[in-house]
Image: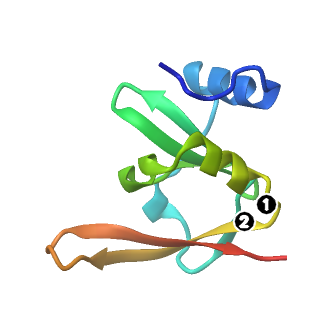
Amino acid sequence: MLTSNLTNSKNRKTLNNVAAFNFATLKLCDLEQNKPYRVQQIQALQTVHGRRVIVDLPEIQKIVFLPERFKCLTNEEIDSLNKQKSIHLVYKGKKTLTSGKVANDLEFLELE
């Protein structure tokens, strides 16, 4: 079941683009390291692999799926983040966790 508010035409348009594969995706690891990318919108989608969170990066006209650990963001938290106009995603490369697993290291900044 999709939990996004489909009455919002922007959400509906993004969802329909995803359904029709009318979007260009980029792997997080393909972003330039330490470069801030402006985030136009954050959305949660229900995929065949479960709930996933995506970010729309208009500067490069790509959508990036965030790591699975971001699925814990609630729709209310995502809505609140979307109200902030100057959020930027910074990919910092890969890092080894204490468990020995390798994960994508990223952060979000609020820039003017």
| Residue sitting at x 33%, y 32% | 49
Residue 78 visible in the current orientation: yes
Q: Residue at x 65, y 25 (%)?
A: 17
Q: Is residue 108 left or right of residue 41?
A: left
Viewer-side label of 1, 2: 1
Please tell me whether mark 2 sits on a helix, a strand or a loop.
strand
Badge 2 amino acid: Ile
The answer to whether residue 3 is left or right of residue 7 is: left
SS label for mark 1: loop
Give the number of the disc on residue 46: none
User: Which residue does the image show at 51% across and 45% down from the upper left?
Assistant: 53
The answer to whether the residue labelled 1 contacts the one labelled 2, judged by CB atoms less than 8 Å apart, is yes
Examine the rendering and report whether any part of residue 42 can be seen: no
Is residue 99 placed above or below 66 in the rendered structure? Answer: below
Reading the image, the residue beneath label 1 is: 84
Left or right, 87 with respect to 99, comes to: right
Q: Position of residue 1 (x, y in %)?
A: 47, 19
Mark 1 burial class by Cα count in 10 Å: few <14, some 14-19, many 20+: few
Residue drawn at the location 42% of the way across and 75% of the way down? 93
Question: In this picture, is 26 found above or below 9?
Answer: below
Q: Nearer the viewer, residue 26 or 68?
A: 68
- Where, quadrant-wise, is the C terminus in this rendering? bottom right
Residue 32 sits in which quadrant? bottom right
Q: Nearer the viewer, residue 41 or 36?
A: 41
User: Disc 1 versus disc 2: distance between alpha carbons?
Assistant: 6 Å
Viewer-side residue, 71 vs 31: 71
Q: Which residue is label 2 attached to? A: 87
